[in-house]
Image: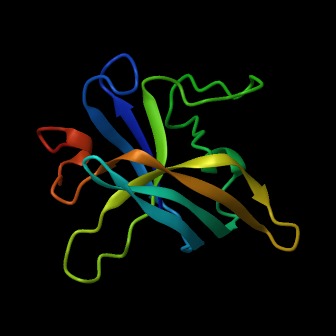
Amino acid sequence: MFLVWTYWEGSETGEGYEVLKQRVEILPTPKAKENMRYAPWHAGILQEGSFTIDEVSVVNYTEDYLRGFDPKLIPGLDMMGPNPSIPEPWDFFYEVVQDGRGGREPERPRFRMDGCPYLKADSAEWQFTLERTSRQRTRKDRSPFGDPDGAA
């Protein structure tokens, strides 16, 4: 499982090329309970659903960091307002990736946090839910996020 920050070369998210700025693997690997389904769609099958993520250390990760708020990475990030958000043209998401055993490049589906992480009362661990988004890199797309030169 990875926290991923990207930056769009245009003036807003989705405009121009998406450039990978930072990818951080969550370690130790958290426990993930899958609640995914595959729905028929006019162009094939659409993966929908969520993961419940558990056993994420509060020692290693703050709530703000799990929500994508990294002021060292994102210039001008304002955390003082009542509803902080990732500014345009930045993007933040999670990738839940299989370990790649089996000889083929694993898919890298994107997820967004549903709500906020909460601290479990019986342990020093975060728990949260990730919802599937529609965008993802494909197995064939080895270049980072559509960059035609393959540079990160």
Q: Is residue 51 above or below residue 67?
A: below
Q: Can residue 62 be spotted in the picture?
A: yes
Please state the total of marks drawn on the protein image.
0
**Residue drawn at (54%, 37%), measured in percent from left and top?**
72
- Toward the viewer: 18 or 139? 139
Q: Give the quadrant of residue 79.
A: top right
Query: In this image, 131 relative to 19: left or right?
Result: right
| Residue shown at the point (59%, 27%) measured from the top left | 77
For residue 44, side relative to residue 13 (left or right): left
- Looking at the picture, how far across and down is residue 107, in whole percent? 30, 63
Left or right: 42 with respect to 66? left
**Quadrant of the snapshot with the C terminus:** top left
Q: Looking at this view, is 35 or 65 the one in front?
A: 35
Task: Name above or below for residue 144 compared with residue 104.
Answer: above
Percent of width and height locating residue 14? 34, 27
Q: Nearer the viewer, residue 126 or 27?
A: 126
Is 83 drawn above or below residue 52 in the view shown?
A: above
Residue shown at 51%/26% (left/top)?
75
Furthest-left residue in this view? 149
Q: Position of residue 104 (x, y in %)?
A: 20, 74
Residue 113, position in %: x, y? 60, 49
**Horizontal placement of 135 versus 52: left or right?**
left
- Up the image or down, 41 lies above or below 148; here it is below
Identify the residue shown where x is 55% and y is 52%. 131
Which residue in the rendered view is the most extreme toward the right? 121
